[in-house]
Amino acid sequence: MFERLIHRNVRARAPLRLGLGGGGTDLLPYCDDFGGVVLNATIDRYAYAHLASRDDGRIVLRADDLGSEDELPATLDFSIREGLVLHRATYKVMMERYNDGKAMPLTISTTIDVPAGSGLGASSALTVALIEAFALALKLPLGPYEIAEMAYDIERVQLGMLGGKQDQYAAAFGGFNFIEFLKGGVGVIVNPLRLHRDCLNEFESSLVICFSGQSRESARIIEDQVSGLKQMDDKTIVSMHEIKEHATRMKTMLLGGQIRQTANVLQQAWQAKKNTASTISNSTIDGLLDVAMRNGAWGGKVSGAGGGGFIMLLANPSRRHHLIEALDDAGGNASAVRLTFEGVEAWVVPE
């Protein structure tokens, strides 16, 4: 049963991301009708996957950070719509496509560095990490585009999870990227931003993330956005066009080293994003953003669909420590964060 398992004990990790601009334009039907663009950057928060062979004819799936576990017989005759759905669906896809439809007894365990509903693309990063772990264990020649596309298929098509396309590509590629989703669904292009080192250092020194204390369910927010898009709601469509333009402007400003001006556009992008669905902001988020703007922040927005999770801010670096203290005093959980430039990685666990 293990004839295809080259490595019996592997780990993988995929980075989470901050969405600076363009979020929502990667949603269907907008990106197919008009083309979408997203500006995002991966950070030093990760989703981890550990895959180890077993000899007892069982499949054990664990999300250690959630305290959840599924135990199944080593067959493919199980539902992917219950239990740990990402683990189940990824396992089933990999066995069907790359192991001749035969099941393997495995333990698959995962952890994520942030709470559920963070708005940092954690679910997609987890799926990407799971695929990469299987790719190493089975010695599959899968590149980042293929991994991202497979993760999108697992989440959005097979599991029917609502969401866009940016998270899978951010996790697979890593780095500071301007991602284009071509009109008509004909393809995705990941363009790494080659920022000057001084600009990267200044941007990172300006960056603060703050957990709002509220995990959010992105599906309802995305459903509101998609509903507006399907109905060709004028306000939603105009706001999406604005969001796309903001992402392009931020890219240009960052390439020119204009961090302060980037923050101004970030603030404009947040106002446009709030126009795409009524559930994107709430009193907690508005309160934390107000505190931030009064304590050194130049601009900020919620990362991800909205409704909770993490707020990202660009601030005067000389006031960043004061800003973090003020946000913590206001009930948030704020910190500095570092950018990362490696995408998903997997390695064999030493014996």
Image (tube, grey):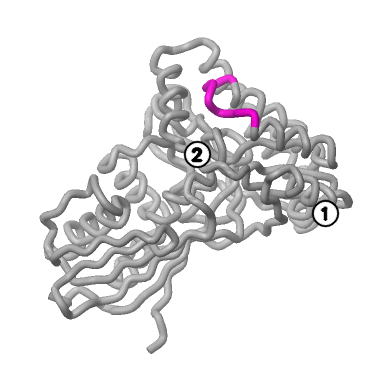
Label ID, residue 321: 1
Q: Position of residue 159 (x, y in %)?
A: 28, 42
- At x 46%, y 24%, the residue is 225
Quarter of the picture containing the N terminus is bottom left
Is residue 205 in view?
Answer: yes
User: Which quadrant holds residue 132?
Assistant: bottom left
Q: State the SS at label 2.
A: loop
Label ID, residue 250: none
Give the main secondary structure of the magenta stretch: loop
User: Which quadrant holds residue 135?
Assistant: bottom left
* In the depicted structure, whether residue 92 falls above or below residue 34: below
Counting residues from the start of the chain, the first of labels 1 and 2 encountered is 2
Is disc 2 surrounded by few (<14), some (14 to 19) or many (20+) residues within 10 Å?
many
Q: CA distance from mark 1 to mark 2?
A: 27 Å
Q: Position of residue 312 (x, y in %)?
A: 67, 43
Left or right: where 308 falls relative to 324: left
Q: Position of residue 211 (x, y in %)?
A: 62, 47
Residue type (three-letter) at the residue carrying disc 1: His
Q: Which residues are magenta?
A: 275-283
* In the depicted structure, whether residue 15 falls above or below residue 247: below
Is disc 1 surrounded by few (<14), some (14 to 19) or many (20+) residues within 10 Å?
some
Q: Say which residue label 2 marks.
A: 216
Q: Nearer the viewer, residue 130 or 244?
A: 130
* In the depicted structure, whether residue 63 falls above or below residue 281: below
